[in-house]
Structure formats: C-alpha cells, structure tokens
Image (tube, rainbow, N blue to C red):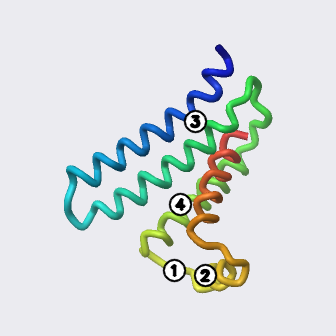
Amino acid sequence: MDDIKRLGFPLLIIVLSAFLSRLINIYLQGSFVQTLMVILIVTALFFFGVSLNKSRKKRSNAVFKKVIAILVVILMVFMQLGYFTLPIMKNVFDFIGIDAFYINMLYIFCGYLFVD
C-alpha cells in the first residue's frame, strides 16, 4: 500500500496536469492562455519534483534551501513569460547549452529541493 501511495502521487500529478492542459486548450481562448499554460506547466513540474521526495522522515528544517528554490522558480517563470530578461543568465544558459528541456528539469529539481 505504501508503494501505491508513493508511486501513485507522481502519476496522479502527471495525469491531472495533462487533463488540465487539455481542458485549457479546448475551452479557453485569449491572450492569457499562453501565460496560464506556462504557469500550469511550471506548477506541475514543481509538484512532480515535490512528490518524488516524499520520504517517511523529514531530512532538514532549513529554510534557506526552500527560499532559494522558490526564488529560482519565480525568477525562471518571469524570464520564461518575458516579463524581464537577465542577459548574463541568457549568456550562461547559451554557453552551457541549457534549453527548455533542462529548464524543466530545473523546475523539478527545485520542487525536490523544496521538500528536502
């Protein structure tokens, strides 16, 4: 039963986020839909990372990691939505080769780090 709970929660997040994105694409129209989809995807990736770190005991009560994880997510979301750009981050991402796939992985890591 514990395995079903531990493995079922990430699967539930995947299914619900896919269903919500489908509903948004079908029933909503307007200029805000793209922004809503980005927020939905980031939220789903973050909570997927959180669900991967569901352990029986809490490892650390440190607030610093949680604050850093949230700040990185907020910074990345605003950059992805185009509200502002940091040329140094764009240059670093281009130099390292970070594209959308790896940014999504970073969202998952921040969710994982938030619970750790």
Mark 1 element type: loop
**Front of the two marks 3 and 4:** 3
Q: Which amino acid lies under the numbered mark 4 shown in the image of this protein?
A: Ile
Nearer to me, 29 or 68: 29
> Is 85 left or right of 107, judged from the image as shown?
left
What is the secondary structure assignment of the residue under circle 3? helix
Quarter assignment of residue 107: bottom right
In this rendering, the label closer to the viewer, 1 or 2: 2
Name the residue tied to disc 2: 90
Front tag of 3 and 1: 3
Quarter holding residue 47: top right
The secondary element bearing badge 2 is classed as helix
Q: Nearer the viewer, residue 87 or 1?
A: 1
Instruction: For the residues labelled 3 and 4, say whether their Cβ atoms are less than 8 Å apart.
Output: no
Percent coordinates x, y for residue 25 in the rendering: 28, 54
Give the spatial CA distance, label 1 vs label 2.
Answer: 8 Å
Relative to 72, residue 115 above or below: above
Single out the mark in the foreground, 2 or 4: 2
Q: For the residue marked with disc 2, what is the amino acid?
A: Lys
Tell me the crowding category of disc 3: few under 14, some 14 to 19, or many 20 or more residues within 10 angstroms, Cα based.
some
| Type of the residue with mark 1 | Thr
Q: Position of residue 35 (x, y in %)?
A: 35, 63
User: Decide: marks 4, 1 in contact (CB < 8 A)?
Assistant: no
Residue at 62%, 51% (x, y): give it.
Answer: 108
Mark 3–mark 1 distance (CA, rounded to whole Å): 32 Å
User: Mark 1 = which residue?
Assistant: 85
Q: Which residue is mark 4?
A: 74
Query: Could you tell which of marks 2 and 4 lies nearer the N-terminus?
Result: 4
The answer to whether marks 1 and 2 mark residues whose Cβ atoms lie closer than 8 Å is yes
Q: Which residue is mark 3?
A: 10
Callout 4: few (<14), some (14-19), or many (20+) C-alpha neighbours within 10 Å?
Answer: few
Decide which of tag 3 and tag 4 comes sooner along the chain: 3
